Image (spheres, grey):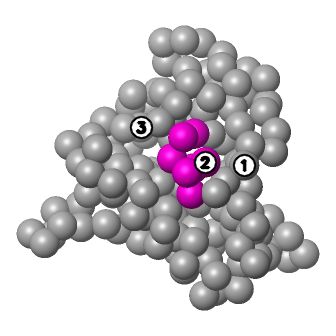
Amino acid sequence: MQPVLAAGDSYPTAMDITQEAAREYWFAEEKTTHVAVNKNGDVLGIYYIRPNQPALGAHICNCGYVVDVSARGQGIASKMCEHSQLFARENGYRGMQYNLVVSTNKGAVRLWQKHGFKIIGTVPEAFNHKTMGYVDAHIMFKNLV
């Protein structure tokens, strides 16, 4: 995860996040975390799923995904997205919302749209991109029922 987080172009965590802090973030109590591995047991990607809001908003989930740089282009993110939707439905979630999809991350925007997510809003300059400065971020949603 470190190279992805340090890139500063798609994920809102601190670019210099420590391994311990990353572990705490990804495996926090309110999250269910899934890891994608190959047949050799190498980690290819990771995602978490959690309620997007507490109590009366907990029927909508939120996810965060990271694919290892060396595993890009192999369909890992797509498979994790499919798995997360299946897991969400099985666990009673009625919708899935991505709160911060960086607008300049065109690959992610296309992938989520391919999986049925719609841009329901755009927050101007919501992400401080490492090289581009402040860029817009999308809120994306998919109904699961």
Image coords of residue 96 (percent x, y): 69, 64
From mark 1 to mark 2, how far is it between C-alphas?
6 Å
Mark 3 and mark 1 in contact (Cβ < 8 Å)?
no
From mark 2 to mark 3, how far is it between C-alphas?
23 Å
Q: Earlier in the sequence, mark 1 or mark 2?
A: 2
Image coords of residue 18 (percent x, y): 38, 43
- Residue 77 visible somewhere in the drawing: yes
The image quadrant of residue 86 is bottom right
The residue at the point 41 percent across, 54 percent down is 77
- Residue 20 visible somewhere in the drawing: no
The residue at the point 51 percent across, 47 percent down is 111
Residues shaded magenta: 109-115
Identity, as a three-letter code, of the amino acid under mark 3:
Leu
- Residue behind mark 1: 118
Q: Quadrant of the C terminus?
A: bottom right
Image coords of residue 12 (percent x, y): 57, 37
| Residue neighbourhood size for the residue with mark 1, other residues' Cα within 10 Å, grouped as few (<14), some (14–19), many (≥20) | some
**Left or right of 40, for residue 105:** right
Label at residue 113: 2
Q: Earlier in the sequence, mark 2 or mark 3?
A: 3
Identity, as a three-letter code, of the amino acid under mark 2:
Gln
Position above or below: 141 against 123: below
Does residue 129 show up magenta in the picture?
A: no
From mark 1 to mark 3, how far is it between C-alphas?
25 Å
- Residue behind mark 3: 5
Identity, as a three-letter code, of the amino acid under mark 1:
Lys
